[in-house]
Image (cartoon, rainbow, N blue to C red):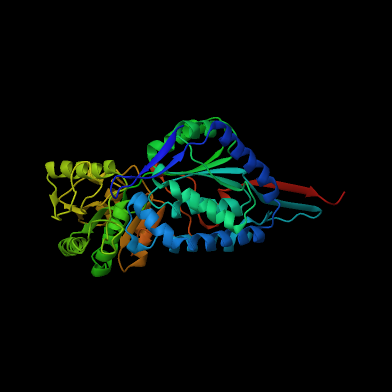
Amino acid sequence: METVKLKSPIDGSIYAERPVATDQAINAVVERARAAQEKWAETPVVERGKYMLAMLEALVAMTDEIVPEIAWQMGRPVRYGGEFGGVKERTSYMVEIAEAALKPVLASNPKDGFRRYVKKVPLGVVLVIAPWNYPYLTAVNTIVPALMAGSAVILKHAAQTLLVGERFQQAFDKAGLPKGLFQNLVMNHAQTEKLLGSGKIDHVNFTGSVGGGRAIEKAAAGTFMTLGLELGGKDPAYVLPDAKMDHAVANLVDGAFFNSGQCCCGIERVYVHEKVYDEFVEGFVAETRNYVVGNPLEQATTMGPMAQARFADLIREQKAEALRKGARAHIDMKVENDRAGSPYLAPEVLTEVDHQMSVMREESFGPIVGIMKVRNDEEAIALMNDSPYGLTASIWTRDTERAVAIGDRVETGTVFMNRCDYLDPALVWTGVKDTGKGAALSAIGYDNLTRPKSYHLREAI
């Protein structure tokens, strides 16, 4: 029997092991989802919302068990208490706006004797392929609005966070959600590709690598299913001369290194105006040295191991290449087990970097950041756009209009001013270029999880 093994980054032990579903079981899951969805589509939106809020309550009730479980699975320190602040905010907001967001759209030019409107109807069966880095937050972005929109959801979670899918299943079961509407599946890559190509799935949402996104598109080719793909990122920040320096430093350090840098919209490169460059670098380095790297089960630890040793080795390779090409490393932190083949490593700050170095061009997804000096806005904008990715960009200034003007020229999905590394559920979450396609959260997210159906009714005959 084929199984999926979850190797903990804490000590390399097998923390969980689950059997891969048989092809017959996968088919049965899809059939149950299709059958349950037909009745669910007739359920009033308000009633659907009650199930979602009950699920949220059940999930939050498991916090004490889930927090150390996350640490064992992917290494995030227990001191940060899981992800349920964001899960609450996103779930509650998407439930709150659902009725208005999903209501029919009337034709803007009324005609006597006719009723004309567009309904937003459910897509049907939605497959969510969720990542390990924020295993609850990233999954809930699609699970809740897809169910609120009247679809059924099948969740395939990352092998690194196997237990998260089970927790969602427990929470939905406790909430009394009708059977078949949410189902957790353990599948291998071949089975996932086969399911995507079967024509039985109406929409897939995938968060992961660019390579993974291309594999999804290839597997789904010819099915005409809709896609939501959030892929790679190399999110930049630009610090202007008028920035509130202590605020910028504290928030950008956190934006670069929280979750060991394993954040979809984490800061991976910083451009600083020459007038404040030295001050910023000094503060950034000093703040970074406050991190305590170690066992994530210990309250004193502020940075745990990366989810897998190979991710840490990529960071080591990027750092070594940058140093060979003339970069300067600023953090000389001694960390137990910081060696090739170990998921534990210290955060690193590099200066004297340029865009010939992979650390400034290729996704790191780890605790390393490069800082470059720039002369003006034009240079900063050109460098921020010199990337195959575009998820978020943050601008640090007290001049809102200047931030907007710069943001208008940056190729990105979200423009931040004086903050970073955050999803506001009232704003659409999307990206450009190799970061992917589609949109999540906000009312626009509902448009991406429904299909329009026009009604053109002649009443006067």
Percent from the top left, x then y, of residue 238?
28, 58
Residue drawn at point x = 24 percent, y = 68 percent: 245
Q: Is residue 177 left or right of residue 401?
A: right
Where residue 193 sits: x, y (%)?
Answer: 49, 32
Against 17, is 118 above or below? below
Task: Say which quarter of the image contains residue 98.
Answer: bottom right
Q: Residue at x 19, y 46 (%)?
A: 354
How many numbered marks, from 0 up?
0
- Return the residue nearer the eye: 30 or 391: 30
Tell me where residue 207 appears, x and y as whole percent: 43, 45
Q: In the figure, is residue 77 to the left or right of 18?
A: left
Is 447 placed above or below 217 here?
below
Would you say residue 299 is visible in this rendering? Answer: yes
Left or right for 284, reference 4: left
Seen as rendered, the residue at the extreme right is: 461
From what the image shows, is residue 318 above or below residue 235?
Answer: above
Q: Is 438 left or right of 236, judged from the image as shown?
A: right
Q: Position of residue 69 (x, y in %)?
A: 39, 54
Q: Can residue 408 be seen in this snapshot?
A: no
Tell me the residue at 67%/55% (across/down): 104
Which residue is more in the foreground, 402 or 279? 279
